[in-house]
Amino acid sequence: QVQLVESGGGLVQPGGSLRLSCAASGRTFSPYAMGWFRQAPGKERAFVALIRWSDSNTYYADSVKGRFTISKDNTMHLQMNNLKPEDTAVYYCAGASSSYHYTQLMVPKWYDKWGQGTQVTVSS
């Protein structure tokens, strides 16, 4: 069994930064792609960013372009800069084992592995 574990969430003031990480434990996990999604209270889970594992191509939601950076080494990371109150949400990392077009990977249902989520709160 592969488990994804997020870390790095917390409380930050508007304009501040946080770095989230997502580590895989258990069996060796070789995803086709991994992504970050977020879910605010009363809203659906929304795409944030994804990275294709083979070539490190990245894709972002328009709302975070220029502020967030997804990257990977043996772990996936999300560097979040210039945070805004509307970024407040539970952030989930996800892994997709199969090959899909990047537009499909902006939708949660194509991912087969999920972390438990980490809370990010942006408030003064």
Image: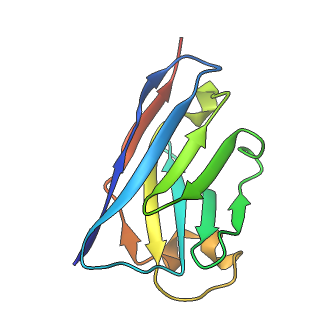
Residue at image point 50% right, 60% down: 73
Could one spot residue 47 in this view of the protein?
A: no
Residue at image point 41% right, 78% down: 112
Q: Which of the two residues, 33 or 72, is positioned nearer the viewer here?
A: 72
**x, y percent for residue 61:** 71, 54
Residue at image point 71% right, 44% down: 64
Quadrant of the snapshot with the C terminus: top right
The relative height of residue 46 versus residue 95 in the rendered view (above or below) is above
**x, y percent for residue 2:** 27, 74
Count numbered badges in the picture: 0
**x, y percent for residue 32:** 53, 81
Q: Residue furthest front?
A: 73
Q: Residue furthest top?
A: 124
Quadrant of the snapshot with the N terminus: bottom left
**x, y percent for residue 99:** 58, 88
The relative height of residue 56 versus residue 71 in the rendered view (above or below) is below
The relative height of residue 76 versus residue 96 in the rendered view (above or below) is above
